[in-house]
Image: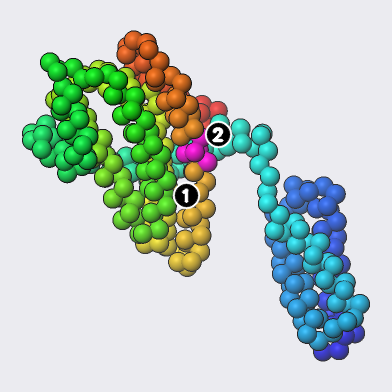
Amino acid sequence: MKEESFIKNHSILWKELEQLNHIINKKGYNSLSSIEIKNYLTLYKRSSYHLSYARTHFPNTQILDYLNTLVSKCQVHVYSVRKISPRYFFNYLTTIFPTLIGKFKWYVLSAFSIFMFGFMLSLIMVLVNTETARFFLPSYLVESIQSNSVGGTWDSSYFPVLSSTIMINNISVALYAFVLGITLGLGTIYVLFKNGALLGALTGLIYLFSDPYIYWSLILPHGLLELFAIFVSGGAGLIIAKSLLLPKQYARKHAIIKGSKEAISLMGGVITLLIIAGTIEGFFTPLNISPTIKLVFSFVTLLLLIVYLALPKLKS
């Protein structure tokens, strides 16, 4: 194709792309309709191809310089990183995230069920036979809990260390439960079950050798949010697994992309929950106050979480 024919055939397309790019420069993406944005991206792709063609067939020409400038200007918008405004983040936390929890509630409930199965199984095993705790917990921890038992009470100085250990573990669990969805969900299921079993075994030992009242007062204030974050991240991992196993009407590649986007959309809320839980664990849980006050705080936290998840319905 000659240069004159090349320009004549495609100049209208380039001008249209220029006009849309000019609008974006002045007013931003929000000024375009969804159809115009799709058209903009299509025109950008075609112009990029034309640029590649011009480099091969029309080197050192004005049309090559023109296309190179045009595509470069558009590239800034196409590959720019979207800035998250405080307003959008607030809207995400108050509306989008709880709405997503409702949308993917069966995945979250499935993660909760797997965790609780591990919890109940290990709890029953430890209550029946204390030695089975070693299947789920390090021997040093089992021995420490048993050896610190004196007349049904346990050295309270050990609880803050235990609480911190559980917090660090829960954060790791939340991240692993999400990432291991890529293993067809097997890794996610294993992580949820294993850590439910860990908590169940620990709880069983506390009921046998220590004071459950103090134990729950140090675990629940931050633990409720941490555990909920684990269930949500586990649900996100199961979303990825489902997109791999059951792509439905989508090609598997597109199903994975779609599932990954849905899963990642939940992780902003998970991180926020973990930050709040970490703050509670660092500044409230260690306070030398009555365990009753801490348990009341935990109950209030649970109520607030329920109200928070119901926000989308309350607004509608």
* Numbered circle sitting on residue 263: 1
Taking the magenta stretch, the answer to whether it contains residue 271 is yes
Specify the amino acid type for callout 1.
Ala
Residue drawn 66% across and 34% down?
Answer: 86
Residue drawn 78% across and 76% down?
Answer: 51
* Numbered circle sitting on residue 90: none
Residue found at the far bottom of this picture:
1
Q: 273 and 27: which one is in front? A: 273
Magenta: main secondary structure: helix
Query: Which residues are drawn in magenta?
Result: 268-272
Q: Quadrant of residue 205?
A: top left
The answer to whether any part of residue 133 appears in the image is yes
For disc 2, the marked residue is 93
Vertical placement of 290 versus 99: above or below? above
Q: CA distance from mark 1 to mark 2?
A: 16 Å
How far across and how far down the image is residue 157, in percent?
A: 30, 20
How far across and how far down the image is residue 69, in percent?
A: 85, 67
Residue drawn 33% across and 54% down?
Answer: 187
The answer to whether any part of residue 228 appears in the image is no
Q: 15 and 224: which one is in front? A: 224
How far across and how far down the image is residue 6, in percent?
A: 84, 83
